Image (tube, rainbow, N blue to C red):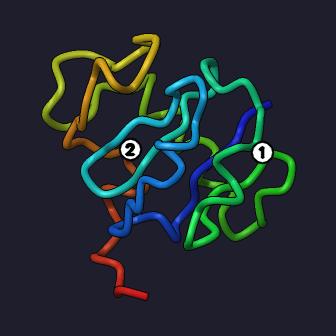
Amino acid sequence: MTYVIAQPCVDVMDRACVEECPVDCIYEGGRSLYIHPDECVDCGACEPVCPVDAIFYEDDLPDEWLPYLTDNADFFTETLGGQDAPLGSPGGAAKVGATGSDAPLVASLPPQASA
């Protein structure tokens, strides 16, 4: 099981969750943040600090945002625009930095209005 970042994060990327994550498993794409499903230790520290309520435990993901479960995983397993290979499991977001790429669902969304 893992935590998932859904649509409310798109074009917001507050990063409070990144600062709170004790295992550095939240990676930065071009328009959204992504939680690595194999690196996440399910501590839940990220969820309460998200100002837009975009982070959900996998089993609690609202039906409308279920596609983000796959999209979140695709960020790590698919070769995305601007990349030569899938990101895989680099063992920490800090060493990777912002990728500038997004998983297919997020990349296909129109710009999201500011809250």
**Residue at the spot 77% in from the left edge and 34% down from the top edge:** 43
Q: Nearer the viewer, mark 2 or mark 1?
A: 1
Identified at 37% across, 48% down, the residue is 104
Residue in the image at 34% along x and 25% along y:
94
Q: Is residue 18 left or right of 63 when viewed as pictured?
A: left
Residue type pointed to by label 2: Ala
- The residue that disc 1 covers is 58
Q: Which residue is mark 2?
A: 103
- How packed mark 2 is, by other alpha carbons closer than 10 Å (few <14, some 14-19, many 20 or more), is many
- Viewer-side residue, 49 vs 38: 49
On screen, residue 92 above or below 60: above
Name which residue type carries label 1.
Glu
In the image, 23: left or right of 26? right
The quarter holding residue 54 reads bottom right
Q: Position of residue 57 (x, y in %)?
A: 78, 48
Q: Nearer the viewer, residue 51 or 37?
A: 51
